[in-house]
Image (cartoon, rainbow, N blue to C red):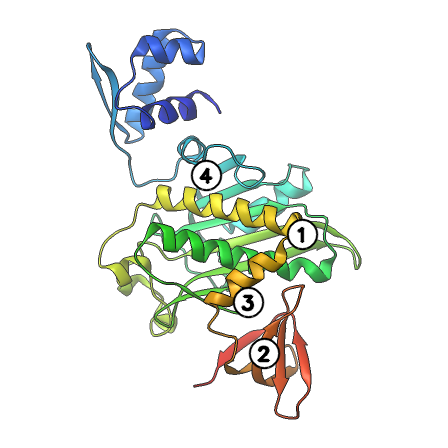
């Protein structure tokens, strides 16, 4: 943790902390602490300073700040041990792809307050208005066969659903493989991009988009009938930095479960919230169109669909349309 993260961490864990205490904990002068406090104030952190009790954190701004996210997150195994925040990028997946090629370690997370070329699955555009959502990407270097990478998408959707349930009074449903819905409308999606050879994975980038405080009228007209935001569902704004930290914590937990061969437990949790299982659906995967009943998830995260001819088809990706 750097000094800003350590200061925010200390202020969050006690009603107030003196300058002397901070300077001894961080091993810097009280003047240096004062300079960091001034900088945090400039960024919008409301920090009160009194001669008797020291510093008190009164309020945090609605902005993503890497040190703040690190301080909220605490100890993680992999995901979030390094965080970068950009005000604007093309796509956080592209930024991280470049960092991955430069050799950064797994677990690095890149957030952007806005993306000018955010993308969704199947080449779709992902609209990312400034300061209204959580648009971020995670770099993973798992020892998995490429066929098993669907497990990561399933784990990500499971972790996102759990984090949302913990943070807001809503019950998200999962639509296979990667959509999170609330009352049947999409609130979040995961774009999994894999780099590797036929038989080995070099790295995986999980790109995650969550419509947090997007106002209903800011949703693109084309998706207004099928998409929603937490703000639209709750009728109030949601604390984005707190939600971001909760999401990373749950993602870190479920990534560990996949690596520790506990995918069955993830799959069970996923199934319990998945509205796709048992439903009649059509999946378009390139030139293929499979129509049938979603029967189960296999041990690599693929969807098993029983067709009207009684065949069990294995689907690893595609566009799913649920039938009534
Ligand atoms: C989907 O449901 O189609 C997936 C949407 C993924 C959007 C996120 S936003 C952050 C990351 N950067 C991108 O360009 N896309 C993903």
Instruction: Assess disc 4: are there few (<14), some (14-19) or many (≥20) residues with their C-alpha within 10 Å of its C-alpha.
Output: some
Q: In which quarter of the image is residue 43?
A: top left
Q: Which of marks 2 and 4 is nearer the N terminus?
A: 4
Mark pair 2, 4: CA separation:
40 Å
Q: Real-space Cα distance between discs 1 and 4?
A: 32 Å
Describe residue 200's horizontal placement relative to residue 189 as left or right: right
* Residue at figure coordinates x 58%, y 40% from the top left: 107
CB under 8 Å between discs 4 and 3: no
The residue depicted at 22 percent of the width and 14 percent of the height is: 53
Q: Are the residues flagged by discs 1 and 4 in contact, CB closer than 8 Å? A: no
Q: How far apart are marks 1 and 3 (CA)?
A: 20 Å
Locate residue 195, reporting x and y percent: 70, 53
Cα distance between the residues tagged 1 and 2? 23 Å
Mark in the foreground, 2 or 3: 2
Secondary structure of the residue carrying tag 3 is loop
Q: Pointers 1 and 3 in contact (CB under 8 A)?
A: no
Q: Mark 3 points at which residue?
A: 177
Residue displayed at 63% across by 62% down: 150
Residue in view at x 51 percent, y 61 percent = 269
Alpha-carbon distance for marks 2 and 3? 14 Å
Query: Looking at the rendered structure, which numbered label has been put on residue 261?
Result: 1
What residue does disc 2 label?
Answer: 295
Q: How far apart are marks 4 and 3 (CA)?
A: 27 Å
Q: Is mark 2 on a helix, strand or loop?
A: strand
Q: Can residue 202 be seen in this view?
A: yes
The mark nearer the N terminus, 4 or 3, is 4
Is label 2 or label 4 in front? Answer: 2
Percent from the top left, x then y, of residue 321? 50, 79
Question: From the viewer's perspective, is residue 21 above or below residue 16?
Answer: above
Residue 85: mark = 4
Q: Which residue lies furthest to the right in this view?
A: 199
């Amino acid at each position: 943790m750097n000094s800003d993260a350590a200061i925010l961490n200390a202020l969050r864990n006690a009603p107030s902390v003196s300058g002397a205490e901070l300077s001894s904990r961080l091993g810097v002068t009280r003047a240096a602490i004062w300079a960091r406090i001034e900088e945090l104030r400039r960024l919008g952190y409301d920090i009160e300073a009194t001669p008797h009790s020291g510093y008190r954190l009164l309020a945090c701004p609605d902005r993503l700040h890497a040190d703040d996210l690190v301080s909220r997150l605490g100890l993680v195994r992999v995901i979030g041990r390094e965080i970068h925040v950009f005000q604007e990028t093309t796509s956080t997946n592209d930024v991280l792809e470049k960092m991955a090629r430069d050799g950064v370690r797994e677990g690095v997370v890149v957030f952007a307050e806005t993306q000018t070329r955010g993308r969704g699955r199947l080449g779709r555009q992902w609209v990312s208005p400034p300061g209204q959502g959580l648009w971020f990407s995670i770099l993973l270097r798992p020892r998995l066969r490429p066929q098993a990478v669907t497990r990561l998408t399933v784990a990500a959707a499971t972790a996102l659903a759990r984090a949302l349930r913990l943070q807001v009074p809503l019950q998200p449903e999962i639509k296979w493989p990667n959509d999170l819905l609330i009352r049947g409308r999409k609130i979040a999606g995961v774009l999994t991009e894999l780099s590797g050879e036929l038989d080995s994975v070099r790295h995986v980038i999980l790109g995650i988009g969550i419509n947090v405080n997007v106002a209903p009228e800011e949703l693109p007209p084309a998706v207004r009938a099928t998409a929603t935001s937490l703000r639209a569902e709750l009728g109030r704004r949601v604390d984005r930095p707190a939600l971001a930290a909760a999401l990373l914590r749950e993602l870190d937990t479920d990534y560990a479960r996949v690596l520790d061969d506990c995918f069955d437990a993830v799959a069970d949790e996923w199934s319990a919230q998945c509205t796709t299982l048992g439903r009649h659906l059509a999946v378009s995967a390139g030139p293929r169109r499979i129509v049938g009943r979603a029967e189960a998830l296999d041990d690599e995260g693929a969807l098993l669909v029983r067709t009207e001819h009684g065949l069990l088809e294995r689907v690893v990706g595609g566009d799913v349309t649920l039938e009534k």
